[in-house]
Each structure stands twice: as structure tokens, then as C-alpha cells.
Amino acid sequence: MNHSMKAALYQAAALTFEELGFLFPNAELEPGQKSAVVDGMVNLDFYGPFNGSLILRVCGEILPTIAANMLGQDEPPSVALQQDVLGELGNVVCGNALPLIAGREVVFRLSPPCILGTESALENSAAQIQIGLEGGRADVFLFIKQ
Amino acid sequence: MAFNVLVVDDSAAMRSIIIKTLRISGVPLGEVYQAGNGQEGLQAVEENWIDLALVDLNMPTMGGEEMITQLRANPDTENLPIVVISTESSDTRIASLRGQGAGFIHKPFKPEELREQISFITGVSNESFDEGGAVSGSGFDF
């Protein structure tokens, strides 16, 4: 596992959830966070000096809370809007992680976010991290194509 | 005097967040228009009086860079104040956008960053926002 990639993924995810979702992340997961059930996944492909994809997975029914926080609403928005929020979270995590990994001089192009089924395969990632968020967690996986 | 603002982003959620942040920032707002890509953004500029465009980069159909290029190539819109709001972090790409006269804000962003960047790109001082938004020499009538 590449530790600098993991550090980049964690830094980008923590910044995103704190500043966009208004949730304070914790690095050491509590038992309830570890066992939280997956409730949404999004994939973003990126193209640049190296190609690959980033998958963001949220677990523990935190997506409705994050979406409501981001939109400034008391009640969670529609499922469609929650998925839109998940896509934007993935976009921001990916957009912030790549320059931490590859430097600020290089240019990456990102694909539009693509919502995945919660059972999608996640093997052979180059790096992955978990981040505790209230009663749930977020997982970030980075895949690099050879 | 208030700004008529166009928000261009393919995410409806992000458009809502930007508009909410605009309201929190204290920038005086008139009409707020929304578009889901650069093509729709150009159409909105053609059909409405826009004082300021807030534009994402990576969008389907037409991205923000192409939209900005077309705006700058049109004598009617070549001086339209534009702020790009994006996850883009490449210094090379950001410098290219600044070269086209666009401001830049990196996602995620805070209301004060949005306010400062709008002040910088429009030439309206921060203090003027609180006083009602008098224009200070930008050449635009808001």
C-alpha cells in the first residue's frame, strides 16, 4: 500500500466532508462505524499523466444527513438529489486528491460521476482509506490503470 | 444595485450550494439564473442580462473552458465578469483561466472566498457590497 497515496486520499476526504458536508471526520473508527452498511457508491475516472478511477463509498445512512447539510435543509432531499450530492462529493475528493499525489503542475481530466451499485467489486486498488463520520463512515478507493 | 448572476454547473446540488453560499456571502443579488452546461449557459447569457457568471469546468455537452472562450470571442460578452468554481488544482490550467480574465475558486469553498473573488473580478469593493454595491471603475453597469 502506498502511504503517500493513502495520506492524500485521507486529507482530501477529510477536507471535503468537513467543509462541504459539515461533518467532523475521525481517523480511528468506532465499532458502529466499522460495521456500517454500504448505502451509496460513486465512480470517477481520471485521465492525465496516469489514468485510473476513484470510488467513494458512504456507509451507515449518513448520505441523507450530508445532503441536507450541504443544501442547508432541515429534511433530507430526494434520493435523486442525494445521489447528485454523492457525485459531487466524489468529484471534490478526486479533484483534491490527484494534485496531492501527482503535483499541482499536471493536468487531469475527470469524467462525470457515475453512481454504482452497492455490491460493485473493489479489488486491486492502489490505495484505500476509511474515514469515520458521525454514525457511519466513508471509504475511498484509488485505482490506477497500468 | 444588485448582480444578476448565472450559475453554471452540471450538478443541481452544487448549483443550490453555490446559490445558498452567495446569499450567505452578502453579495447583493438580483435575478439568479441556472444552467447545467456551457451550452445552456451561453443561451442564458444571450437571453438575459447577466452581470456575473459562476462557471464549473468539467461538464457534459460543453465544458466551462469552451463556454469562456466563446464568451470572450463575442464583443457583447467579452468583458463579462466570470468566476470559475471547480475542483481543478492544476496551476497550469488555473493560470490559463486567469489569462482569459476569469477568477478562480477551488471547491470546497467558504462564503468569504466567494465574496472576495467576486469583489476582485467585478471591481466592486467588499465594503460596497454592504452599502448596496456601487461599481468602482470596472466599466460595467450593474
Image: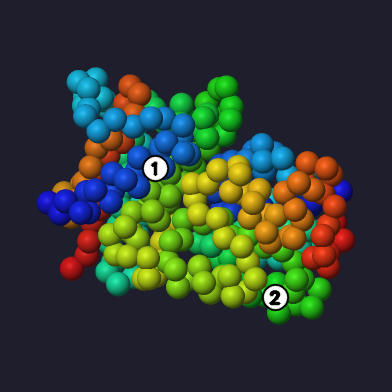
Give the residue drawn at x 18%, y 68%.
A146
Q: Which residue ends up furthest to the left in the rendered image?
A: A1
Give the residue drawn at x 49%, y 50%.
B107
Mark 2 neighbour class, 10 Å CA radius: few under 14, some 14 to 19, many 20 or more: some
Note whether B108 is above or below A78 in the view shown. below
Mark 1 neighbour class, 10 Å CA radius: few under 14, some 14 to 19, many 20 or more: many
Tell us which disc is closer to us: 2 or 1. Answer: 1
The answer to which of A118 and A12 lies nearer the viewer is: A12
User: Is residue B62 something one can see in this rendering?
Assistant: no
Note whether A134 is above or below B20 in the view shown. above
The kind of residue tagged 1 is: Leu
User: Is residue A74 something one can see in this rendering?
Assistant: yes
Give the residue drawn at x 68%, y 54%.
B118
Residue position for label 2: B72
Q: Chain of mark 1?
A: A
Q: How is the image coloured?
A: rainbow
Q: Position of residue B126 (x, y in %)?
A: 72, 49
The kind of residue tagged 2 is: Arg
Q: Position of residue B92 (x, y in %)?
A: 45, 73
The answer to whether B1 appears left or right of B103 in the picture is: right
Label 1: state its secondary structure: helix
The answer to whether B27 appears left or right of A17 in the picture is: right
Q: Position of residue B42 (x, y in %)?
A: 71, 65
Label 2: state its secondary structure: helix
Tally the marks.
Answer: 2
Q: Chain of mark 2?
A: B
Q: Position of residue A61 (x, y in %)?
A: 37, 25
* Mark 2 to mark 1 CA distance (whole Å): 34 Å
Residue position for label 1: A15
Give the residue drawn at x 69%, y 61%.
B121
Note whether A40 is above or below A74 in the view shown. below
